[in-house]
Amino acid sequence: MGSQSPRRAQLLKDAGFEFTIRIKDTDESYPESLPADEVAEYIARQKSAALIPELAPGELLITADSIVVLNQVIFGKPKDEEDACLIIKKLAGSTHQVYTGVCLTDGKITQCFTERTDVTFENLTDKEIQRYVSTHRPLDKAGAYGIQDWIGLCKVRGIKGSYTNVMGLPTQPLYAMIKNWPQ
């Protein structure tokens, strides 16, 4: 797996897969003209391309990237706590989209897909936002929140789509793709 996300690693482990983690610094920029719903897959492809030379025969590489989108504005990982608070304040009381792009490759064949989940937040007070950011430290999460912690437990009104996608890895379609991978 080409990701340093502890949530992605746990999801793969819980799905029953054995894997090793490989990380390579990769440029995560994207063309400004790219539609928001294509950005996560574009970045996942970039991560995959960077790691393909390190693949051994028979290995299957999984890379992924997640973004949060509200009104066509893309929110990745926050720069700092202040940025995290601003992002969550913008998401509060609205429905946003979480896109995760996933790529699988064995070095010869590459297959990628994007999963979308709509997430609706309740309103949050400034105090709730500040407490959440200071106690849960969501600086490594797209959109500055983790669905699996307080904000997901107490302030998400609804989810339309894959819960694990919001955690960073849509496990159901990924599992099916791995199980059907050409041998």
Image (tube, rainbow, N blue to C red):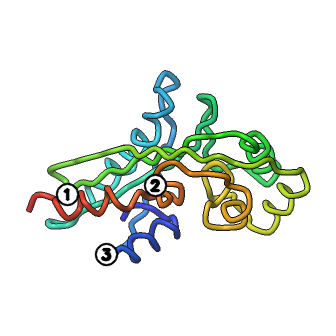
Vertical relation: 181 (above or below) 27: below
Q: Which residue is drawn at 55% across and 44% down?
A: 118
Count of numbered badges drawn on the protein: 3
Vertical relation: 70 (above or below) 63: above
Q: Which residue is drawn at 40% across and 42% down?
A: 41
**Quarter that holds the N terminus:** bottom left
Residue 44 lies, in percent from the top left, at: 40, 47
- Camera-side mark, 2 or 3: 2
Tag 1 residue = 106
Residue 5 lies, in percent from the top left, at: 51, 64
Which structural element holds mark 1? Answer: loop
Q: Residue at x 32, y 77 (%)?
A: 16
**Quarter that holds the C terminus:** bottom left
Tag 2 residue = 162
Report the front residue among 123 and 64: 123
Vertical relation: 21 (above or below) 108: below
Counting other residues with Cα less than 10 Å from the Cα at mark 2, is it few (<14), some (14-19), or many (20 or more)?
some
Mark-to-mark CA distance, 2 and 3: 19 Å
Residue 35 lies, in percent from the top left, at: 47, 27
Give the residue type that dot 3 points to.
Phe
Proximity of marks 3 and 1: CB atoms separated by less than 8 Å: no
Residue 50 lies, in percent from the top left, at: 35, 50
Residue at the limit of the structure toward the top, as seen here: 33
Q: Residue at x 21, y 66 (%)?
A: 59
Tag 3 residue = 17
Residue 113 quadrant: top left
Residue 135 quadrant: bottom right
Which structural element holds mark 2? Answer: loop
Residue at the limit of the structure toward the right, as seen here: 127
Give the residue type that dot 2 points to.
Ser
Counting other residues with Cα less than 10 Å from the Cα at mark 3, is it few (<14), some (14-19), or many (20 or more)?
few
